[in-house]
Image (cartoon, rainbow, N blue to C red):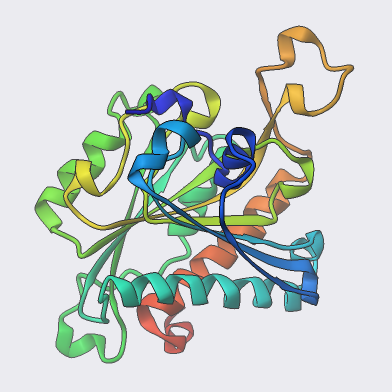
Amino acid sequence: MIKESEFFNIVDEQIEAFSQNFDFKKEKNGKYDFEKLTYDVLKEQEKDLKVKSGHYECLNFSNLILFLKSAQNYATKKLFEVLKKFFGELKITKNSLILCVGLGNRGIVSDSLGSMVTQKLLATSSIPLSLRKDLGCLCFLNTSVGGLTGVESFLIAKSVTKNLKPDLIIFVDTLLTHSLKRLGVSFQVSNSGITPGAGVFNPQKSLDKNSLKAPVLAIGVPMLILGKDLGKNILTEAKNMAFATKEVDIYIKVCSQIIADAINKACHGSGYKNYI
């Protein structure tokens, strides 16, 4: 069994570090340098790869998605396609209750991706079915971080899940990467769950299907990079510190909109825009 502290945020970076012969699917498109990496990690591979078993899809784009609306729309379309694929496998319909959970500290810009996404979602679960028309059934919450609330994300998610009994839980959080070029432009989606705090050496209890007794998806974008990955001249005491770029507020704004639009469309269909 792997220690949760050994899990790394970006799965293909972790796999490449521990295995040179791992099979994965790669899809490329010249438009906005789009690349999709697809991984299936088996239970028996967890120990060697130090990655949780499950299905992973990572969408990589050029930094044009941070500035061009057409590129942002393309990224939303690709992420929506991945979500719909997962929804189909889980038999999620518009009558299925979907809970989206924003992880992270909203008071720190680089860690506010989860809360920024949820505030852009169209929550409909409290609306009677007869009045929802063609909209899906979506609700959300933000757990913040235990250092602020005194309550760990797992306890909040577990309690709400026990009462709501959602058909699917979607977690959204900031990730950590080894590569500067992936900051704000890589979107990882998986059904393996997520371990809050793992990227900054403070792992909490894992949020996954086994611990919550409900199907989960985890969506993340790297906004942080370790000092040791910034170059040889970094101070020794800063090598294990996480850094963000000065444009991280732009990254968060753009990426949260892309994720929120993809989730809204997957849950409600294109008509959700009439209500926002």
How far across and how far down the image is residue 213, in percent?
Answer: 16, 50
Q: Count the marks: how many?
A: 0
Residue at far front of view: 21
Q: Residue sitting at 54 percent across and 49 percent down?
A: 113
Does 8 sit left or right of 214 as displayed? Answer: right
Q: Is residue 58 above or below residue 275?
A: above
The quarter of the displayed image where residue 207 is located: top left
- Is 193 drawn above or below residue 274 in the view shown? above
Residue 177 pos. (x, y %)? 65, 38
Q: Is residue 203 visible?
A: no
Up/down of 48 relative to 125, above or below: above
Q: Is residue 192 left or right of residue 179?
A: left
Residue at position x 29%, y 45% in the image: 208
> In the image, residue 43 lies at what x, y percent?
33, 44
Q: Quadrant of residue 215?
A: bottom left
Residue at x 71%, y 71% (from the top left corner): 28
Quarter of the image with the N terminus is: top left
In the figure, is residue 50 to the left or right of 68? Answer: left
Q: Residue at x 66, y 17 (%)?
A: 240
> Is residue 77 shown left or right of residue 133?
right
Residue 197 pos. (x, y %): 46, 30
Query: Is residue 7 placed above or below 235 in the rendered structure?
Result: below
Tell me, yes or no, if residue 24 can be seen here. Answer: yes
Spot the residue most to the left.
163
Extreme-right residue of the structure:
233
Which residue is at the front of the view, 245 or 62?
62
- Judging depth in this view, the residue of 18 and 113 nearest the camera is 18
